[in-house]
Amino acid sequence: MARTRDPAVRTLLVERAATMLRTREPITLRSLVEGTGVSTMAVYTHFGGMDGMWKALRQEGFTRLAARFAAVPTSADPVGDLTALAAAYLGNALDHPDLYRVMFDASFDLEDLKAADATLEYLVQAAGRAIQAGRFRADSVPLDVAIQTWTVTHGLVSLVANGPLPPETLANGVTLLTALFTSTGDDPERCRRSVESGWRQSGPAR
């Protein structure tokens, strides 16, 4: 007889694993369920085992990132919107550094690869609107601009969330994104204003 899956138990175990990552506790089948009130069988019921648990943990990171992106409003300033998405990425990584580390651990697959890819689409759409608005060169490729934006943002937050640099380093995001978007064709002064506005809107409160 198949055991019934309880979404609350699944969430409990994912949160427990995330907490253990943050506190650097060794994660094993038994240590994961210790103190939760559920048995080790729950890990098999909901994830098929520990490998499935890690897949779910990676997926949770992208799920929270997607929710963060979805909360960023669309405005008449696509460059500001693209910046706001980049800043939201930073904020999400700093709020969930444990999940952020696991998101890019290719040792385990994702439960839903399309859902993870969809997070990039938010940036692609903003970049596309910037091209259509004449802010970026007409021959710019939205996907390329989105990837470049993600790369700059990822590198910056990685050096702060899991690396050697202090939180003050995040302020360089305005300069880096302004340089990127200016090289993509935007007017320097207009670009700076848009980037600063988008950064204030969604930037991490650090």
Image (cartoon, rainbow, N blue to C red):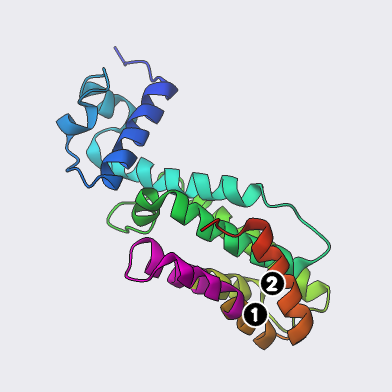
The residue to which callout 2 is attached is 195
As rendered, which of 40 and 171 lies closer to the eye? 171
Crowding around mark 2 (Cα neighbors within 10 Å: few <14, some 14 to 19, many 20+) is many
Left or right for 163, reference 189: left
| Secondary structure type for disc 1 | helix
Question: Residue 97: percent from the left, percent from the top?
Answer: 39, 53
Highlighted magenta segment, given as a residue range: 152-175
Q: Which mark is first along the chain, 1 or 2?
A: 1
Q: Quadrant of residue 205?
A: bottom right
Residue sitting at 58 percent across and 62 percent down? 87
Q: Which quadrant: the N terminus?
A: top left
As rendered, which of 16 and 174 lies closer to the eye? 174
Residue 172 inside the magenta-drawn segment? yes
Q: Quadrant of residue 106?
A: bottom left
Q: Is residue 138 visible?
A: no
41 over 58 or under it: above or below: above
101 over 173 or under it: above or below: above
Q: Amino acid at mark 2?
A: Val
Marks 2 and 1 sit apart, C-alpha to C-alpha, by 6 Å
Q: Is residue 140 visible?
A: yes
Q: Are marks 2 and 1 in contact (CB under 8 Å)?
A: yes
Residue sitting at 75 percent across and 74 percent down? 193
Question: Residue 183: percent from the left, percent from the top?
Answer: 66, 87
